[in-house]
Image (cartoon, helix red, strand yellow):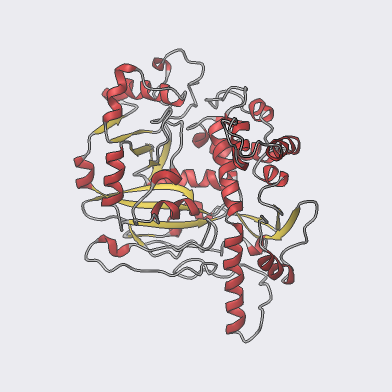
Amino acid sequence: MPVISAEVALFFQDGGLLGPATNGKRTISVTALSSPVTSRSTSSSNTIDRTSFSATFVNVPQDEIELPQELKSRETYEFIGFNEETASKLWDQYLNRPINDPLDPFDFDFMDYARSQVRNHTVPDVLSITDDWTPTMTTLGISQCLQLSILHPDFDDVRATASCKFWLLDSIEMAFKTLEGMNGQLRQEMERRQQLAVLSGRERSPPPSLPAPISRKGSLKSTTKETIVPSKGPAAFKDTTALDKGPVAGVTEQEAPARLPGHTMIWRACLLSEAVECCESRLQELDFKSISSSPGDFGGRTAVAYFSPQRETADRYAMYKKHRFSIAELAILQVAVPDSLVQSLSINYLWADGAESQLWKKVIWHCRRGQRLPKDLRYMGNKDLWIGHIAKSTNSSFATTESYTQIQSPDVLAVQVNGEWRNAIQWVFYSDHAEELFAQCCKGKTWIHSIGKLVEASK
């Protein structure tokens, strides 16, 4: 299956924005991909929109991007982050895979080979930034480009909150999902340009030298319809986003409230497509599957979804995601959680300081190593909501320390909130009961803030 369909490819080729297929790849102008320019403005203290996040304004000018011609190809393995040699090896494995073999216990698909190359390789994971990640990534066959992106020195604080293999898997998944949604995104841009041509009385508008300006209601790339749900309560703020064919589509954004009486706002940085998938389930209730991961601070072997009650924490993670894959369309998901819901749940409080610090260290030490909690802590799995500080491995190595007692107090991610440095906080709705109540009680209280891509067209 081609990354770009014949119809869409022809449109952009005629406009001089897409090159011909050569050696399994083709070059596309960033003008056709980049999000419209957003001017920084002073947001109201009562509302939140995409301009409320610093990550929105993190951009790098670039002229063109090289894409694989086919979605499942050797070139795609290279595109998502492997060097040429490893990409060829993975492609050979995929081509020679057993098909409908009842004796094959794995039944691997295309991306399973990429995941297995990282997850199941004999080279040990690196759990601390006090260790050198380069030898591990080189052994895994990771491209120099992805290595440099993951090791970006400006984001050592965020990198320290997970392991080497975690960030590698997160990065290649982000790249492949972006490629899967590329045709849908380009189709929207094609239709936008065709509509402009009709309005201007021409059959086809010439490609602009600069990205189109952004309207108050979001990117002009978006042709999705906004539906405001009438309500007497906060559900009236909800905007509904429709997907084009493919997992990535535009989002028509409406200003969200900065606060709601009787609610706590929580935030998460993710792909735009993941945010839409999370919010647009069949029952119009939140579905955590698209945003869950493991291992992590509170999930050694259990995939869980992390949120933060600090907008600044989500913003910081969004910046790191932008730098790890430059053409990924990112978003920050905002959810208003009723305080009455939180009060009805059983809660594990896990703080790095105070009376809970030893418990925090013990949980972090086991979970970040991908282990189950010890027997004396199994009772914690019965609690609905886990709230605590985000661990980082700046001063301690989770892999080499012999005991959780060696974890130091400063090993906590810090973010600036209103000009002051504070420990970063995370929430996990851990039990099935908590997830179900969360989905029901937060229905109509979600907002998706599209923060765009890292790349923008050169001026």
Q: Looking at this rendering, what residue extends furthest in the right direction?
A: 23
Name the residue rendered at 45%, 59% in the picture: 50
Expressed as whole percent of the image width and height from the top left, the position of residue 260 reads 26, 56
Q: Quadrant of residue 435?
A: top left
Q: How many marks?
A: 0
Residue nearest the observer in this picture, 20 or 338: 20
Q: Looking at this rendering, what residue extends furthest in the bottom direction?
A: 201
Q: Quadrant of the C terminus?
A: bottom right
Expressed as whole percent of the image width and height from the top left, the position of residue 169 reads 56, 37
Residue nearest the observer in this picture, 78 or 45: 78
Q: Is residue 216 visible?
A: yes
Q: Is residue 34 visible?
A: no
- The reply, left or right, for residue 276 in relation to residue 8 is left
Expressed as whole percent of the image width and height from the top left, the position of residue 62 reads 68, 56
Q: Quadrant of residue 134?
A: top right
- The reply, left or right, for residue 191 in relation to residue 315 is right
Expressed as whole percent of the image width and height from the top left, the position of residue 382 reads 27, 29
Residue nearest the observer in this picture, 107 or 226: 107
Q: Quadrant of the N terminus?
A: bottom right
In the displayed structure, would residue 271 be above or below residue 366?
below
Q: Looking at this rendering, what residue extends furthest in the top direction?
A: 402
In the displayed structure, would residue 82 be above or below residue 12?
above
In the displayed structure, would residue 439 be above or below residue 119?
below
Residue nearest the observer in this picture, 140 or 117: 117
